[in-house]
Amino acid sequence: MEKHETIRGRILLWFYLRGHTGQPLPIWFRRMFTRSQIHRAWLSGRDGNFWQHGVRFGPANPYREYRAAIAAELDEFMAAELQAIEGDTNKIQYGEP
């Protein structure tokens, strides 16, 4: 049986989704349920943590596709910068204005 199929799992999922959509919990509620699974579910949703295929993703471990897209953009940028630097050194070396 999946976690979200039990009543407890549905309650925790509801709190996770409240945190994920940015809905705050009242301070008194958060203090009452500090360090409980309810508070942790809400906090995980608020921070953007999730599990996929046994791997936890979140702020410290971004999603792989996101990291791959950033790496590709960075590679493009660095290649363009390298070409610009090589062009500048060629102009200086050959005395071009």
Image (spheres, rainbow, N blue to C red):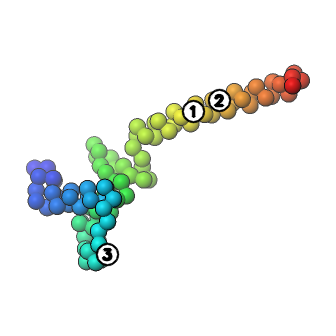
Q: Secondary structure at mark 3?
A: helix
Read off the residue under disc 3.
27
In terms of sequence position, does the residue under pointer 3 or pointer 1 come before the other?
A: 3
Q: Residue at x 34, y 54 (%)?
A: 49
Q: Position of residue 34 (x, y in %)?
A: 29, 74
**Pointers 2 and 3 in contact (CB under 8 A)?**
no
Q: Quadrant of residue 97?
A: top right
Total number of numbered labels? 3
Q: Amino acid at mark 2?
A: Ala
Residue 80, label in figure: 2
Residue 19, label in figure: none
In terms of sequence position, does the residue under pointer 2 or pointer 3 come before the other?
A: 3
Read off the residue under disc 1.
75
Q: Residue at x 80, y 28 (%)?
A: 89
Of residues 3 and 73, the one drawn nearer to the viewer in this rendering:
73
Viewer-nearest of discs 2 and 3: 3
Q: Amino acid at mark 1?
A: Asp
